[in-house]
Image (cartoon, rainbow, N blue to C red):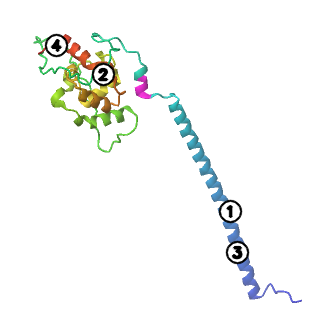
Amino acid sequence: MFGLDPLSRPVAVIEILLLLAFIAFVGWLLGRLALSGRISSLRTAIADQEAELEECRRSKAAGGVPGTIARTANTPKAPPAFVHADPLLPAIAPDDTPELIDAEPELPAVAPVADVQPVMPPAPPVIPTPGLPATGNSEAAVLSRIAARSGELNFDRIGRAVALEADDLKDIVGIGPFLERKLHSLGIYTFRQIANFTKEDIDKVNEIIEFFPGRIERDNWVEQSKSFYERKYGSKN
């Protein structure tokens, strides 16, 4: 038998190539192990994130974090200063059109008083900001959606008002703080405007403020607003 001479050039070249191949194989194997560990770590992190997201969804569905609307709905509301209509009265018939109130309230003359602290006006309505998403259930997103649809109302019929003229709409049975902010975002501030609602206005406002269908009629907002307007400003025909 003939053996290979380890000192010959061809044998040396073959040994070097075998050594390089072995080193390359070891490097590839180590790389695969490192990549496998990295992938396993990423899969574990993704699974943890999915578990947290699912837990958050279950908590929200179960009412664990009810949000602003739920808190508003569950908050006991103080009785209004004036209660004209029974909130359990039947809804207004479709052909009932409320009487318009065109006259502006006359403000009584007030003598100047020294050292009177200025009264802060109500907060202005939320105006949609370019680039701000109008989706979601946060209060800012809801008010932004409502303000964006204010042009759908016929203000020539119901009248226009600004924040400085705002009445306390929470006096109306069925309107809470958050619902009042929704109406402000829509441009509705006064009893006079609500008293001028027609059936068409009621349906449109009910839709825009994302309220329970038919609730405005069941709570009789129009008649309550007429009563509050007359009590506060006097009958204007």
Q: Which mark is residue 4?
A: none
Badge 1: how crowded within 10 Å, few (<14), some, or many (20+)? few
Q: Mark 1 highlights which residue? A: 30
> Mark 1 belongs to which amino acid?
Leu
Badge 3: how crowded within 10 Å, few (<14), some, or many (20+)? few
Tell me if residue 69 is in the magenta stretch: yes
Displayed quadrant of residue 88: top left
Q: Give the residues drawn in magenta, as a range.
A: 67-71
* Residue 115, visible in the rendered structure: no
Secondary structure at badge 4 equals helix
Q: Nearer the viewer, mark 3 or mark 2?
A: 2
Quarter of the image where the N terminus is located: bottom right
> Where residue 8 sits: x, y (%)?
77, 88
Q: Is residue 72 above or below residue 230?
A: below
Q: CA distance from mark 4 to mark 2?
A: 24 Å
Q: Mark 4 highlights which residue? A: 233
Q: Nearer the viewer, mark 1 or mark 2?
A: 2
Q: CA distance from mark 1 to mark 2?
A: 73 Å
Q: What secondary structure do most residues of the magenta stretch adopt? A: helix
